[in-house]
Image (cartoon, rainbow, N blue to C red):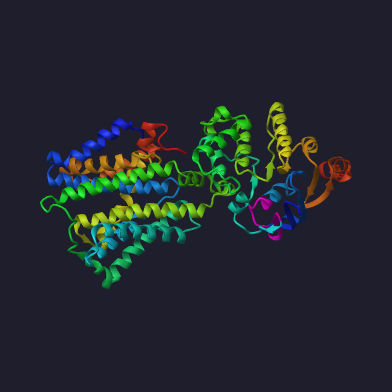
Amino acid sequence: MNASPAGLVAMAALLVLLPAAGLPPYYLHLSASAFLLATLASAWSLLAWGGQISFGQAAFFGVGAYAAALAAMHGVASWAALALGATAGAAAGALVSAAALRLSGAPLALATLAFAEIARGIAINWERLTGGGAGIIGIPALPGPTSQPRTVTYYLALFLLAATLSIFGWMARSRLGLALAAVREDAERASLLGVNPAAWKLCAFALSGAVTGAAGGLYAYMVRVVAPDLVFSSWYSLAPLIMATLGGPRTALGPAAAAVGLYLASELVLQPLVPALHQVGYALALIAAILFLPGGLGGLAGRRRNAAP
Amino acid sequence: MPLLEGRSLCMDYGRVRALGGVDVEIEEGQVIGLLGPNGSGKTTLLNVLGGRIIPTAGEVRFDGALVTGKPPWVFGRLGIGRTFQIPRPFAGMTALDSALVGVTFSRRRKLSRAADRRREAERLLAIVGLADKAGARASELSLGELKRLELAVALSTRPRILLLDELASGLSPQARAEVLGFYARLRDRGVAIVAVEHSVGTLARVSDRLILLSGGVIAAEGPPSTVLASPRVAQTYLGDGDE
């Protein structure tokens, strides 16, 4: 998906100024949630760039959420707790990649799904650490003006999204992006040219896990509770997949734009009109993308540039 | 010491023996032509020497070091380049990015700046006559152009040896002549080549030594004139004449 630099700057300025314009707390929360989902969709695309399909991003999200929550409960500063969430997510990503070293395509996707379920099972059963099925409640709020807690999470979610988009843009033009693109197209051929596919695929998983883990950590601070069925929910595996597929996983802005658009349309339009079926929009979007938009909206709009190789 | 060496190479696919104990030595800057009918083991030998498959028995040495069983990317980084009989371009990438892969990941190039790597990839495309196709994807290239891209990609690692699988076959006479020109230029630069070509005449013209494979074993070996004069060549290609 192409966007002119001037358009991007205008969009960024608008998003930065929105809270100051007096956006009600509910809409700030909704926007922060949309940014978080956009971050998850971009993190999913970091993996898809190398041809790796994940059905288990909830594992990294949940691990990051629990790591940040536990750190916060032990008095660790919020920035350090969020960094810990990212680190835990990266470690989980690297672990999945190492364990699924020889897998690709559907078997890899199923392995990631299994890993997410295993992580959820551990969170439920390791009660002494995780609080079991009830999870951890009473996570301290993020520092900032107590009258406007939503504003703090809004800006942090926006910052995380901007950072993730920057990482994607850097990756697409870096050695990592080139190696992953070559592995995606023909792993054996890439290998014969000196690319070590396993190492680069592991890097992609760790990077995607770090971003997703950071989002999980921020989510823990936003809702101030973590529980297995909440943060390891399959929603955090499926939503990024659907949003990135619709937006175009090989574009920098496509997945994020699709995530924000789909989520806000679902919450602001479908939810009031058809509450029981408001999530049908996601299913329809996925079906439409598969049938009519193989490259996603980003591929349709861009047709070129932005996403290097 | 030979640059690349195969000792007692055997390769079995189930009960089918594709290579039955082949010894081969390739010196720096030497062009070896592999002859033989379909199924004689030519491509299998290239696959074993290039690290694409691990031989059932025997060993491969590069510069004296044992490389049998090492992953393919080790072979690529050492400087063993490869083209395929049916071109295998990175379909979703441009010609420039395809050439950039080897330039970036070869240990034989020390180009730390992205701009230098890009310039080198552009130079490789220019060498094979694809300078104006840098932004084209595989689907936009003709067979002849895809073969040239194969060569540019193989050269991108700055190889010391190239394993070329029917680079000239399927091309027009003019394009084939250009490919023969590449053989000569590469040899002049000291790059060793092991080439498989359907045309015996083509191979004889460019090779220092010919190896005739038949049923997975070496049936004849030596200078082109000697091997072509050998009755084994006629026997292998035309049969005994008794049937």
Work out whether residue A87 or residue B204 is closer to the camera in this orientation and state it.
A87
Q: Is residue A171 visible?
A: yes
The quarter of the displayed image where residue B241 is located: top right
On whether residue A85 falls in the magenta region, the answer is: no
On whether residue B55 falls in the magenta region, the answer is: yes
Which percent across, then down, holds residue A73?
22, 65
Q: Residue furthest left?
A: A147
Q: Residue at x 81, y 44 (%)?
A: B209
Work out whether residue A58 or residue A293 is closer to the camera in this orientation and state it.
A58
Q: Is residue A284 visible?
A: no
B9 vs A194, left or right, is right
**Image height of B54 relative to B173, above or below:** below
Work out whether residue A162 or residue A192 is closer to the camera in this orientation and state it.
A162
Which percent across, then down, holds residue A110?
41, 56
Q: Residue at x 71, y 59 (%)?
A: B59
**Image height of A201 relative to B187, above or below:** below
Q: How many marks?
A: 0
Q: Residue furthest bottom?
A: A128
The quarter of the displayed image where residue B236 is located: top right
Q: Quadrant of the N terminus of chain A?
A: top left
**Image height of A122 relative to A174, above or below:** below
Question: Which portion, as a residue range, is magenta?
Answer: B47-63
Which percent across, then down, holds residue B220?
84, 48
Work out whether residue A80 or residue A95 is closer to the camera in this orientation and state it.
A80
